Structure formats: C-alpha cells, structure tokens
Image: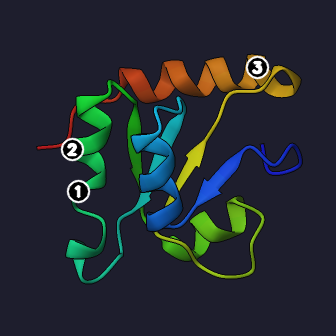
C-alpha cells in the first residue's frame, strides 16, 4: 500500500478521509499518550462500518507505513495492485473481537 501511495497517516489526515467517506482498514497504535489524541477515531470507524485494529507500538506502525517517524493512526486503502493481500487482511481484522 505504501508503494502505491494508498496509506493515509496521522490523526488529521485519517479523520479527514474517513469524513469524506473513503473505505479502508484503520490501524491505531496502542501506546499513544494522551489517548484523547485519537479516541474519536474508533467511533468514526464504527459509525461508517470501517474495520479497525490496534497494534502495540506507534514506532512499528510508522515503520510499516514507510515512514521514519512514528505515527498513531493509519488508514490503508484498497487498490488493485495488492487486492488479494488487502482482502486477506480485511478478513483477519473483521474476525477480531470488538474492543471493550
């Protein structure tokens, strides 16, 4: 997704594209402090039926998004170049239990 430039990163950018109605998988970092920075993003995802998941580290999330800087949230958009891998990830994230 990074090679195809189909990753949105950062709270402001992800929030903007969720509001615009873009589809994708949202990934949030669990070690973000204060949590108020992005606590509204899961609610936005649930309202729009977007799948989301948490990962432990924002450093790992930034590296996975192709950045040297840590980031607390990314949105991975679907694209025909990696559609099979995207569908597999979507299935895995959708099978996760809802966070309490």
Q: Please tell me which of labels 2 and 3 falls first in the chain.
A: 2
In the image, residue 37 above or below residue 90: below
* Label placed on residue 43: 2
What residue do we see at 59% from left, 28% from top? 89
Position of residue 43 in the picture relative to residue 90 (left or right): left
In 3D space, how far apart are the residues under numbered discs 2 and 1 (Cα atoms)? 5 Å
Q: Which residue is mark 1?
A: 40
Q: Quadrant of the C terminus?
A: top left
SS label for mark 1: loop
- For the residues carrying marks 3 and 1, which lies nearer the camera in this image? 1
- x and y, in percent, of residue 90 in the image: 54, 24
* Disc 1 crowd, CA 10 A, few/some/many (<14, 14-19, 20+): few
Image point (51%, 46%), residue name? 17
**Residues marked 3 and 1 touching at CB (< 8 Å):** no
**Label annotation for residue 83:** 3
Label 3 and label 1: CA atoms lie apart by 28 Å
**Left or right, 55 with reference to 59:** left
Gap between marks 2 and 3 measured at Cα: 26 Å
Residue sitting nearer the eye, 89 or 4: 4
Residue 18 x, y percent position in the rendering: 44, 42
Asked whether the beta carbons under mark 2 and mark 1 sit within 8 Å of each other, the answer is yes
Q: Residue 57: give x, y in percent of width and height.
A: 48, 70
What residue do we see at 54% from left, 72% from top? 71
In the rendered image, which quarter is residue 38 located in? bottom left
Mark 2 crowd level (few <14, some 14–19, many ≥20, 10 Å Cα): few
Task: Find residue 20 and report its horizontal and vertical position in percent.
Answer: 47, 39
């Amino acid at each position: 997704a990074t090679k195809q430039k189909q990753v949105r990163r950062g709270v402001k950018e992800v929030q903007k594209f969720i509001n615009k109605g873009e589809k994708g998988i949202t990934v949030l970092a669990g070690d973000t402090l204060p949590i108020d920075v992005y606590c509204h993003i899961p609610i936005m995802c649930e309202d729009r039926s977007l799948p989301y998941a948490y990962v432990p580290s924002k450093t790992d999330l930034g590296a996975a998004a192709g950045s040297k800087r840590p980031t607390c949230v990314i949105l991975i958009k679907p694209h025909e170049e990696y559609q099979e891998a995207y569908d597999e990830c979507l299935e895995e994230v959708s099978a996760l239990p809802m966070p309490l």
